């Protein structure tokens, strides 16, 4: 792993720890709100989708054959990854909040702490390897 890969991998957990540190700011502070919202919207999802990065890159997007733009696959894959990051983050927030509500331990700080720890843990896990796409014997794609 190159130092640049390591820095990119550690950005989501750093955002979480920064959001936790922003809780020390006054309650109505726009900086506090922005740090927490940006982390909750993208941090956990970026770390979790990053785990599956090589597996997601194995199959590129398919578009219309007649009018395919030269950069269609790259832009489509980038948009897909961005949407996955946002939706996985929202899902993780909902699951953690539901678990804490069910255990009668809900607070915004606990949700943020649990998601920061999850994001940090996901950043340290090794990336999933991509397996080659399966082809049926005797069939042409």
Image (cartoon, rainbow, N blue to C red):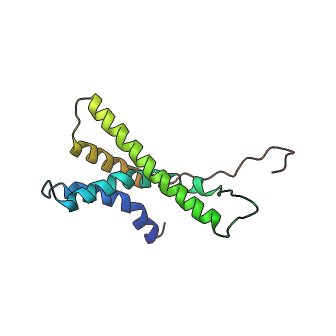
**Is 81 left, or right, of 139 in this rendering?**
left
Question: In this rendering, does residue 33 appear at all?
Answer: yes
Q: Position of residue 136 (x, y in %)?
A: 80, 44
The residue positioned 14% from the left and 53% from the top of the image is: 27
Q: Which of the 4 quarters of the picture holds residue 36?
A: bottom left
Q: Residue furthest right?
A: 138
Relative to 9, does residue 93 appear above or below in the rendering? Answer: above
In front of the other: 115 or 72: 72
Relative to 96, does residue 70 appear above or below in the rendering? Answer: below
The residue positioned 84% from the left and 50% from the top of the image is: 140
The residue positioned 29% from the left and 28% from the top of the image is: 102
Question: In this rendering, does residue 126 appear at all?
Answer: no
Q: Residue furthest front?
A: 67
Q: Position of residue 33 (x, y in %)?
A: 23, 56
Q: Residue furthest left?
A: 26
Q: Position of residue 60 (x, y in %)?
A: 65, 58
In front of the other: 8 or 87: 87
**Is 54 left, or right, of 133 in this rendering?**
left
The residue positioned 23% from the left and 29% from the top of the image is: 104
Q: How many marks?
A: 0
Q: Position of residue 88 (x, y in %)?
A: 44, 47
**Is 130 left, or right, of 20 in this rendering?**
right
């Amino acid at each position: 792993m190159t130092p640049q890969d390591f820095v990119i991998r550690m950005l989501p957990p750093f955002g979480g720890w920064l959001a936790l540190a922003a809780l020390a700011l006054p309650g109505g502070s726009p900086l506090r709100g922005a740090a927490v919202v940006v982390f909750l919207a993208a941090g956990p999802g970026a770390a979790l989708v990053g785990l599956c990065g090589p597996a997601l890159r194995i199959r590129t997007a398919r578009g219309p054959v007649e009018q395919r733009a030269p950069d269609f696959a790259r832009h489509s894959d980038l948009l897909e990854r961005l949407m996955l990051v946002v939706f996985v983050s929202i899902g993780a927030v909902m699951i953690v909040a539901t678990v804490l509500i069910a255990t009668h331990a809900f607070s915004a700080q606990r949700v943020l702490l649990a998601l920061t720890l999850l994001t940090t843990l996901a950043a340290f896990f090794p990336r999933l390897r991509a397996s080659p796409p399966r082809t049926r014997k005797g069939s042409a794609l």
